Image (cartoon, grey):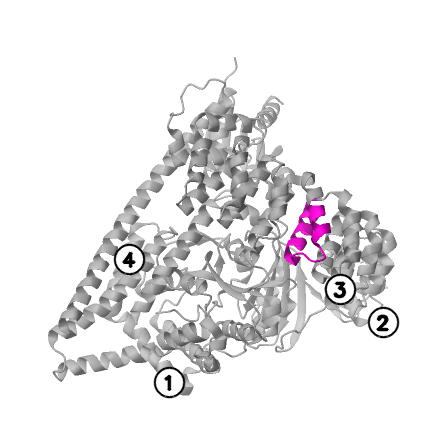
Amino acid sequence: MATKYRILLADDSKVVTAVLVAALEKEGFEVESAADGDSAYELGRSESFDLAILDQLMPGLLGLEIIKKWHEEGVVLPVIVLSAIKDESTAVESIELGAEDFVRKPFRIPELVARIRRRLHS
Amino acid sequence: MPDLVLWAVLTVFAIDVVMLVGLIILKAVHRVRMRRDAERRTQYLTLLSRHLTYENAVDPIPSNAAEDEAFLDAVIDLRYTIAGSEIERLSEIATTYDLVSRQEGLLRKRFGGLRRLRAAVSLAELGNEASAPILMEHLDDSDDEIRVQSARGLARMGYTPAIDRIVGRLGEESDWVRARFGDALAEFGEDASAPLMAFVIVNHADGDTSAIVQAIRTLAAIGDYSVGPRIAQVLDLSSNPEVQIAAAGALGGVGGGFAIPSLIDALASSDWRVRAQAATSIGEVGLAENVDDLVASLRDRAWWVRRNSAAALVRLPGGVEALYRALSSVDPFARDAAAEALEDSGELAKAVTNHREQRATRDEARLLRHMRGSGVPGF
Amino acid sequence: MQAYLIFLGIRSALVLRNSWFLHRFGRFWEMLASDSTPPISIVIPAYNEAQGIVDSIRSMSIVRYPRFEIVVADDGSTDETLDRMIEAFDLEIVQIPYRPDIATAPIKAIYRGHSPVDITVVQKENGGRADALNAGVNAARYPYVLCTDADVILDADCLLASMRKVVEDRVRTVAVGGNIRPLNGSRVELGHLVEASVPKSMIPRMQSLEYVRTFLASRPAWSSLEALPLVSGAFGIWKRSAMVEVGGFTPGHFGEDMDLTMKLHRYHLEKGIPYRISYDPSAVIWTEVPETARVLRRQRIRWHRGLMSVVSDFRALTFKRRYGKLGIVTWPGMVLFEYLAPIVEFVGWIVIPTAFLLGALNTASLLALLALAFGIGLLNSLLALMLDEAFGYFNSPRDTSRLLVIALIENLGLRQMTVAWRIRAIFGGKSTMTWGNMERRGVGSLAD
């Protein structure tokens, strides 16, 4: 068995965090969570992860800004963006900036998990 | 005399002290309670998430969780965040732990308006189908907001027997409640079309105008094309401008090509608001054959009609070209209206860029000249 | 005199409780984010705001509301205000229909842009804040306008909260006022309020308490009594058609917001048109208040002169039955408790010590009277602070204790200072009739 995949989860909503942590840990992933943009950005820079799930709208740095900064600093980290329905345009923009995928909220847990698995194995 | 004053002073100070102490206590209690509530809520969230994810979760949910507001909040939060089959599982949990029955009990109480409202909101958000009967009862509650929440809850569950009841109440409610009932009916979707249409047909001549207008707006929101011809009829028959405006507006979305004759007639109404709305709706229907009708309306004497006609032209095939032509109209108002619509739709920005790159078309140059007022070198 | 404020305070408490409850549990924001919500034009007057205008517009553009536009009226700025806007938002000069529904100083040009939101800039000749707002309203496309200032920070939900009042009763509601809080001392980043706190220095801190008293303990009551005399200029939602009917803001008026509110009252009462002017305590905005006594003095003098103009213009309302509650209760109340109040208080300061010195009043009675005045004033402040608890903006105990301290020492000079200024305004004549440079309008009057 290979080592566990490490996932960085950044969302300011406790609900989303709770749900995703439970779901991802069940899949056997290791999850680190951040509640705001600045800590998410720092974590992504300083520790190694296999995937990041970023909420678009958080206090501190926005999801978009984090992706841009990581890109500039050479942090290689596939990103899935979580987007509330209203944020359609920013979600698309983040894809253009290099995010791998985006998922709208409210989301279906199995679907999100499937997308994560796909990203990780590719 | 001094005695009275003295008593007054003492009383006032006594109240002051009481309030001061009260303030301090309130603040302390508030802070502690908020922190603890937040903690418990997070705990419940984690707990519930595990129960949703794993078939047999290890940590049990406390059997008296229903009495804890934090549990209720957590369940409702989850209901908003996830979609799909987990919702059923969540509903099961809510029922198993008596969450739903507890809220129903609270709603039934005679007194305690705010708590009852909270219960109504919770039931609406939990969306548990077993709650449908109690919510139906409370569509007649004396409290406005509780009626609103009942309708909302029933709509979220998709409990169609409620539709007729809600439509029936449209005529009796205040603006706010009626608007929220409209939202609820819109959420029911096409099942609500027929009852609403019946309501409009029966009442549009002599019923409460606001109720008719709301019903028509809701029909438009539902977007069921089958009501188009009927609404067109209402537009033709009604002599009430408010109803006409609403009907014309709805036809933009649900009328399709069949609505055009009625809309063209409305474009000639004596009431400018009806004309303005007709213009917008013709734009929504979006048929090239109506370009000329709207171009004629660019010269309407009412500002809003001109404006809406120009904006509508943008949406028709060949409309943008017509607007460019209108820039040379003899009527200065038509020219201005056309210019504004072209600006709004991004044509001006395009013209500016093209001009900068030395490849503006003749039309674009004309638009720039119109906006900038002075000569623009080029063609 | 303070006693009537207590009555208002208690009534406000009930109104606030309902409002807070609905705010917390109603989740009305979803409901409002629907198609049936009317669009709004945010109208901002700008005069030499080159420094912050771009940031202000950007921060306003993130407000949570389905459909709105921003209209800036450049009131003949002599700096690069206009250029900065043109550059930042890709504005283009346009020749489009402009409805001069309200007469204003001549318009020079109009600019339009669409990013990040629809922006219209009206460049005009200088005419003052009221005139600029009128021009902005002329250029506004939507049926409702929010008149505010460039340096105001809007709470994300303030439009939803205040427009709720409109949606509740669309036909009758012609204006809605909001809740204004001093920004001084709070942490702002990128145009967002990150952390609210009570200002550090004395002068703005005193104003914090004043504003809490007004906006939490006073306005809700006025509004529920349907006799709100003032929708503040810093945050007012107006139905465009109604505003146009009464000629918009009166240019050059020192209290143009109160003037417009009263014009609307009078117009609808005289014509017998059912109407409603509302207030929503959850519609919160933040603005800078004067930091020094000198600037505060100018502001208060200006407000009081504005009040005087309004009182004089609308004196025909007093006690006339046809003006309903407004004429019989609110208006005389306003005159008595705000206009004349400083005089009464001032006279009190003179009469009471004199009576004491002359022996007409013994020590005990003197102390008793002073204590009574102090006690009731404190009661008002405490009531307001308790109401403020409901909103949780001043969360830290330290903030509340700071305000408490102010409540206690207010009467040792701070209050007297404001009274003296208002007396000055009443008897000051010509020298008080200046604007300074076109500056903050503030809240116009605080029921105090």
Looking at the figure, which quarter contains the N terminus of chain C? Answer: bottom left
| Secondary structure beneath label 3 | helix
Q: Identify residue for label 4.
A: C402
Real-space CA distance between mark 4 and mark 3, rounded to the nearest whole angstrom = 57 Å
Real-space CA distance between mark 2 and mark 3, rounded to the nearest whole angstrom = 18 Å
Check disc 4: other Cα within 10 Å, few if <14, some if 14-19, many if 20+.
Answer: some
Q: Identify residue for label 1.
A: C428
Q: Amino acid at mark 1?
A: Gly
Q: What is the chain identity of the residue bearing mark 4?
A: C
Instruction: Residue B114: tell me if it is visible.
Output: yes
In magenta segment, residue B212: yes
Q: Camera-side residue: A113 or A64?
A: A113
Check disc 2: other Cα within 10 Å, few if <14, some if 14-19, many if 20+.
Answer: few
Check disc 3: other Cα within 10 Å, few if <14, some if 14-19, many if 20+.
Answer: many
Left-right relation of C399 to B198: left
Give the foreground label among 2 and 3: 3
Horizontal and vertical percent for residue B300?
A: 80, 68
User: What residue is at 61 percent from the left and 43 percent from the top?
Assistant: B165
Q: Camera-side residue: A96 or A113?
A: A113
Instruction: Residue B356: tell me if it is visible.
Output: no
Whether labels 1 and 3 belong to a single chain: the reply is no
Q: Give the magenta range.
A: B196-222
Residue B305's mark? Answer: 3
Q: Identify residue for label 2.
A: B330
Real-space CA distance between mark 2 and mark 1, rounded to the nearest whole angstrom = 58 Å
In magenta segment, residue A90: no
Whether labels 4 and 3 belong to a single chain: the reply is no
Left-right relation of C138 to C374: right
Q: Amino acid at mark 2?
A: Val
| Secondary structure beneath label 2 | loop
The mark that comes first in sequence, 4 or 1, is: 4
Q: Camera-side residue: C219 or B46?
A: C219
